[in-house]
Image: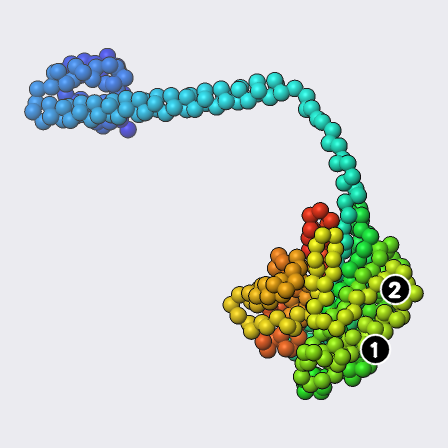
């Protein structure tokens, strides 16, 4: 335990002894001595009065340490002052900004509005709906196992999808009649409603024979047309094109293609069935191409099998553009509408339709892009042309 030395005694000792001497005299530790001296304010007198060489060097070292400590303290105080100045500057700028924004907001006043008037006659904008029906292949079965579970198809599913299709057509017409005055529906029958027996694997796999299949397809289409007559107020214009699957010959004919088509027979039957219906007009001819005039636009319909697509880098677009360019040299059309390729594509000057059958084993084999069953729905406005192209999904 350190001895008790009074302040007066400590001052006396400081006048005649060094720090080391005080430690020896009192038994205090060096730390305690410096602390007491500092408290008494006699630290400077010790340096002045030190006489021994060792004590003087020690005192000089201590002074250097204290000087360094003072310098560090002043530097820290200066740095803190600079940091505080920066913070004050930033806070001042932020305060000015907030104050300016507040003053600007207070000067805005209440929100003012104006009335948007309906354009005269806009509700009378006239449009025609075009729906493409093609590539149903109703009697060609698709087993789920053949396409890795991506699709399944048979006659029952074909009828279910077709029924859904006609319901959606009627629904979409009603929706768009809120925007346009729609009086006509072009229901384009573009072929391949059956798969037929043009290949050996189809002869083996198809669930029913071609004549039975065409009869079944006719029943589904006729039922759909009757539904549209009942559920809508539009007139139906029905251009009809033969596909490449519904033929009665092994090889595709050119001049006699329509004469060997079961689908042309079906179209004639449908035309006869609806002959008393004033709201329906069928367009059936012997040419591969069928033209129809809508407002000031020319529409060209065909199945699509005359377009030679070899699976090139550009996909369907390049061969379609080439074919359309050649046809336009003899008779121009603003848009071509066709199917055959089972993929719904909008090429700008053409619409390629999807299919009802969907993804099948043949599509897997030729590495075709996957596509769900769908058919095309198009709106052509009288003064703006093709205003809308959308898909009708059937799954």
Q: Which residue is mark 1?
A: 215
Density class for disc 1 (Cα within 10 Å; few <14, some 14-19, many ≥20) is some
Residue 131 point in image, percent of width and height: 75, 61
In the depicted view, which residue is nearer to us: 252 or 113? 252
In the depicted view, which residue is nearer to us: 17 or 186? 186
Judged left or right of residue 240, residue 338 is left
SS class, disc 2: helix
Density class for disc 2 (Cα within 10 Å; few <14, some 14-19, many ≥20) is few
- For the point 69% across and 63% down, which residue is it? 300
For residue 27, above or below residue 226? above
Q: Residue 249's quadrant in the figure?
A: bottom right
In the depicted view, which residue is nearer to us: 363 or 354? 354
Q: Residue 298's quadrant in the figure?
A: bottom right
- For the point 85% across and 74% down, which residue is it? 269
Residue 24 point in image, percent of width and height: 16, 25
Q: Which residue is mark 2?
A: 226
The reply to whether residue 165 is in sight is: no
Residue 175 point in image, percent of width and height: 79, 50
- For the point 70% across and 54% down, which residue is it? 297
SS class, disc 1: helix
For residue 375, above or below residue 30? below
| Disc with the residue nearer the chain's start (2 vs 1) | 1
Q: Residue 251's quadrant in the figure?
A: bottom right
Image quarter (top left, top right, bottom left or bottom right) of the N terminus: top left
Residue furthest out toward the right: 276
The reply to whether residue 233 is in sight is: yes
Judged left or right of residue 334, residue 235 is right
Judged left or right of residue 53, residue 355 is right
Image quarter (top left, top right, bottom left or bottom right) of the C terminus: bottom right
For residue 387, above or below residue 262? above
């Amino acid at each position: 335990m350190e001895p008790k030395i009074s302040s007066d005694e400590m001052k006396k000792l400081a006048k005649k002894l060094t720090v080391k001497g005080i430690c020896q005299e009192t038994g205090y530790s060096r730390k305690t001595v410096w602390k007491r001296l500092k408290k008494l304010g006699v630290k400077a007198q010790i340096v002045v009065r030190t006489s021994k060489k060792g004590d003087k060097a020690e005192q000089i070292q201590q002074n250097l340490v204290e000087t360094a400590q003072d310098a560090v303290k002043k530097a820290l105080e200066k740095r803190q002052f600079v940091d505080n100045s920066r913070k004050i500057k930033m806070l001042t700028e932020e305060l000015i900004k907030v104050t300016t924004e507040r003053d600007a907001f207070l000067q805005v006043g209440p929100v003012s509005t104006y009335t948007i008037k309906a354009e005269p006659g806009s509700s009378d904008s006239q449009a025609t709906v075009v729906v493409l029906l093609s590539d149903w292949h109703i009697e060609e079965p698709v087993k789920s196992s053949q396409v890795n579970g991506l699709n399944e198809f048979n006659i029952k599913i074909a009828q279910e999808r077709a029924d859904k299709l006609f319901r959606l057509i009627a629904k979409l017409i009603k929706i768009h009649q809120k925007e346009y005055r729609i009086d006509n529906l072009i229901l384009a029958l573009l072929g391949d409603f059956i798969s037929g027996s043009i290949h050996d694997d189809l002869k083996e796999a198809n669930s029913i024979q071609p004549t039975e299949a065409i009869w079944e397809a006719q029943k589904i289409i006729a039922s759909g047309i009757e539904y549209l007559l009942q559920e809508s107020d539009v007139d139906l214009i029905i251009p009809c094109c033969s596909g490449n699957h519904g033929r009665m010959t092994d090889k595709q004919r050119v001049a006699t293609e329509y004469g060997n088509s079961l689908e042309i027979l079906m179209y004639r039957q449908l035309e006869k069935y609806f002959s008393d219906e004033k709201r329906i007009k069928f367009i059936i001819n012997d040419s591969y191409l069928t033209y129809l005039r809508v407002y000031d636009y020319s529409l060209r319909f065909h199945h699509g099998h005359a377009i030679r697509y070899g699976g090139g880098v550009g996909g369907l677009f390049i061969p379609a553009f080439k074919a359309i360019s050649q046809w336009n040299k003899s008779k121009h059309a603003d848009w071509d509408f066709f199917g055959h390729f089972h993929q719904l594509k909008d090429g700008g000057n053409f619409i390629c339709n999807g299919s009802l059958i969907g993804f099948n084993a043949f599509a897997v084999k030729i590495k075709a892009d996957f596509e769900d069953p769908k058919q095309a729905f198009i709106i052509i406005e009288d003064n703006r042309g093709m205003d809308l192209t959308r898909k009708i999904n059937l799954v």
